Image: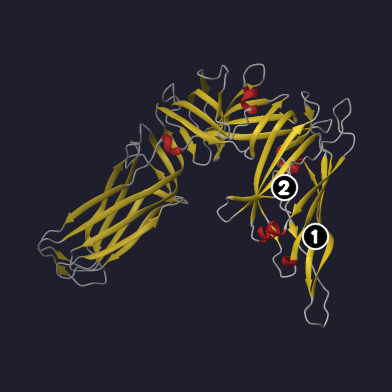
Amino acid sequence: MKKTNLLFFTFSIVVFFSCRKEMGKPSWDTHILAPLVSASLNINNLIPDSLLQANADSSLKIVYQNDIYKLSMDTLFNIPDTALNNTYPIPSGWNLNPGQLIVSNNLQETTYQLQGAQLRTIIIKSGFVKYTIKSLIHGVTDFVYSIPCAKLNGVPFSINIKVPAAVGSTPGIFSQIYDLSGYNFDMTGINQNKINTLFTSLSASLDAAGQPIVTGPSENLVIENTFYDLIPYYAKGYFGQNTFDIGPSITNFSLFDRIIDGTVQLEDVNFNLNIENPIGMDSRLFITNLSSINTNSGNTIDLSNSVIGSPININRATESNGIAYPTYANFPLNTSNSNIKPMIENLPNKFGYTMQIVTNPMGNISGSNDFVYSDKLLKASLDMEIPLSFVANNLTLADTLNLTVSNNNESQNVISGNIILFADNGFPFNASMQFYLLNDANAVVDSLFDYANTIVEAPINSSLRVIDKKLTKIVIPLSENKMALLYNTKKVRLKVKFNTSAKPQYIKIYSDYSMDVKLVGDLNYTVQMQ
């Protein structure tokens, strides 16, 4: 049986036969009563146990966190692809001896425009440099290409290249892509007095093992140097004073994903809107809208709280030995200061938000020591604690399940019968259910129940605590046609509708509540002798 977040069961029908007799394959109808499924279901089948915590009295609460917004490094700056093309003309009639320098330690700087950001250091998470040389020199040439400002384990990036000689007017060509992942780039230029600037070095000489040559007209070297897909893991500098408008945007909220209808009234909810900032940069955040969205009902409820529209000042993080220590801003949302309770009773499957972030609102007060790690970014989240004390009215949960019905020859001899559900309910709510049989396109072709059914709620005492379980028997008739349809069905859609007892009083759910479920097949089938 598949365990999901719903209280449900699925069918696995297997009928075994062992009768054999040497005769002319006679057949007859017979009857079998066989247990199919037996299980004990608790609240973990409704809600993942990772989200549940027990109070001192064994009543349960949901503890859940949902990220609303997470800043991306691209919001702060983006390093564009950059291509550097240089041509080095060679004087005609130049006598070149083996090993003689043609280009000596040529340095070239490249400065990036980065949305107001002024970077001094970056560590590359991923990215590449493509280096291409086209030589019209009629001799093999040796190149040393380096990026002195890029170091891996303290060693600068440097490569030795041998470029073939030109043949006639056809240049000798070398082209190679190099991975820069993990390299630490000093972005202060050759003299370490700039920002957003890297530099490269190039030397070229005639191959020491070659022959002397005399250069002809129009001989040159063409260097194409392309940095692309540079994504930093870490950056340090000044990230600028910028204003970023975010949204309107929508983020998923998975807690109530399987609830498709009905209403719930919660006794209490306690929320915290948390802002976590692991970036070494001061910010000012404005939340102009935060809304609970239920796409099933089409209902949207906007948060009403003083945090909406008010400036939220977020202090910069600190770092030590490659570890960022975040700062936090917390804003409690409860029934006394907000409408968070009706927002959650809306059973949202999405949250909408509109925000504005101002970076470094007081300017470069860090002395160009802002820092950011790509895996440690500013985020806004809702941390919630919801006691499982509620009133449910036709609260409907749905899920799609795999259906396994044996299709061996013996089981297909089943011609009709009943499946009997025995549910010994220890929960203080009743439940009715329906299974919809789906075709390969997930369209409904039939349903399992032909009549309304109810699993009766357990009895409760004056403290609204369950005192005993309540047994319900439900018979599911299976005609020959429905049996044939079951054999060809791979998936079913289950809908379960809940109603709490003792309305309008709130009902608590305790950790010892459970429901014992047993399925029994009361089947008619045809036995054929071999």
Q: Which quadrant of the structure image shows residue 62?
A: top right
Residue type, numbered disc 2: Phe
Image coordinates of residue 19 in percent, x first then y, are: 83, 74
Left or right, residue 151 beside residue 102: right
Quarter holding residue 174: bottom left
Give the residue at x 42% y 40%.
121
Q: Is residue 278 visible?
A: no
The residue indicated by pointer 1 is 523
Relative placement, left or right, of 299 versus 5 is left
Q: CA distance from mark 1 to mark 2?
A: 17 Å
Disc 1 + disc 2, Cβ < 8 Å: no
Quarter occupied by the C terminus: bottom right
Q: Earlier in the sequence, mark 1 or mark 2?
A: 2
Q: Position of residue 164 (x, y in %)?
A: 25, 68
- Residue type, label 1: Leu
Q: Which residue is mark 2?
A: 449
For this rendering, which residue is in front, 133 or 65? 65
Q: Is residue 391 visible?
A: yes
Q: Position of residue 275 (x, y in %)?
A: 56, 28
Occupied quadrant, residue 56? top right
Where 159 falls versus 529 (above or below)? above
Residue at image location 30% in from the left, 43% down from the top: 110
214 is higher (above) or lower (below) than 184: below
